[in-house]
Every structure is written in C-alpha cells, then in structure tokens.
Image (spheres, rainbow, N blue to C red):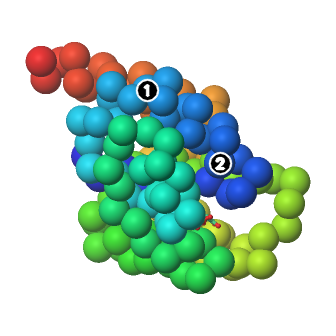
Amino acid sequence: MNIALIAHDKKKDDLIKFINQYIGIFETHSLFATGTTGQRIMDETSLNVTRFKSGPLGGDQEIGAKVANKDIDCIIFFRDPLTAQPHEPDVSALLRLSDVYDVPLATNEGTASAVMLHLAEIKSKNN
Ligand SMILES: O=C(CO)COP(=O)(O)O
C-alpha cells in the first residue's frame, strides 16, 4: 500500500514514536510524507520515505494530487488541533479529497492505531 505520513510540528515527536511502535508494518509499505515530517522519519527511523514539499509550501497539496490520482491508499496525519496553521486551507483541501476518494485518513493516534491493526491483519492473512 502507499501510505502518506504527515505531522504538524508539535505532533512530530508523537508520530516518530508511533512509527517506531509499528515499524514492522510500515517497512512493508511504500511511504510518502510532507517535507519536514519525511526528513524526521528518515533521520529517526530505519524507514525510507518519498518526500514532498513542506506542508506550508505546498506539501499537503502535493499529497492531495496523489490522492486525486488514486496513488495513495491511506493517510496518517497527526494534526495539532491547538495551533493555527498558516496553510489551513491546504489542510482542509487534503481532508476533503480523502473524503471525495474514500481514502482512509487517521487524524489522531487513536484512529491511526486502529488503522495499523487493520494493516497488521492484512499482513498476517497474506503470509
Ligand atoms: O504542515 C504540515 C501538514 O499540514 C506538515 O508539513 P511538514 O512535514 O513539512 O512539517
């Protein structure tokens, strides 16, 4: 599967911790990320990631374009609900496209954990 990973600045530590928790599942998928999130993932985990521009510079939109082209199967987006983002319209556009194309989108750790359990189930069925 093609999985997009995104985290706002105050959630990046949480995302890295989350990824390391489920590293065995993530390493069996193709990963995409916005710029800074992707760099942190590559620096702090063993995973390789295709990086787009940083979110405020268009990265959410680039991932949105991939969603519209049916190139993304799942999005894990650790959003910061307590900090205003200068590129909020881009974030909303990505969330909207995930609904348009019915792409699973986890915007917090609880939902992301549920998604990972689902991916683990698929993996064990395929083995
Ligand atoms: O702002 C973001 C998502 O809206 C994330 O972008 P970065 O990964 O470049 O910080």
Determine whether, in the image, residue 37 is placed left or right of residue 28.
right
Question: Is residue 32 at all visible to an observer of this figure?
Answer: yes
The percent position of residue 26, horizontal first and vertical second, equals 35, 36
Q: Is residue 25 above or below residue 3?
A: above
Task: Classify residue 94 by image quadrant.
Answer: bottom right
According to the image, label 2 marks what residue? Answer: 12
Figure label count: 2
From the viewer's side, name the closer residue of 11 and 69: 11
Q: Is residue 83 left or right of residue 112?
A: right
Q: Nearer the viewer, residue 36 or 110?
A: 36
Location of the C terminus (image quadrant): top left
The residue positioned 40% from the left and 66% from the top of the image is: 51
- Regarding residue 96, the answer to whether it shows in the image is no
- Percent across and percent down for residue 86 are 77, 78
Which residue has dot 1 on it? Answer: 22
Residue furthest to the bottom in view is 57
The residue lying at 81 percent from left, 53 percent from top is 81
Q: Which one is in front, 40 or 123?
A: 40
Find numbered disc 2 in the image and state the secondary structure of the residue it sits on: helix
**Ligand 1 quarter of the rendering:** bottom right
Is label 2 in contact with label 1 (beta carbons under 8 Å)? no
Dot 2: within a 10 Å radius of its alpha carbon, few (fewer than 14), some, or many (20 or more) residues?
Answer: some
In this view, 41 is above or below 59: above
Left or right of 73 in this view: 17: right
Q: Residue at x 50, y 65 (%)?
A: 34
Crowd rating for badge 1 (residues with CA inside 10 Å; few <14, some 14–19, many 20+): some
**What residue is rendered at 65% in x and 70% in y?**
92
Between the residue at mark 2 and the residue at mark 1, the CA separation in whole angstroms equals: 15 Å
Q: Amino acid at mark 2?
A: Lys
Ligand 1: does it lie within 8 Å of the C-beta at label 2? yes
Q: Secondary structure at mark 1?
A: loop
Type of amino acid at the residue the image marks with label 1: Tyr
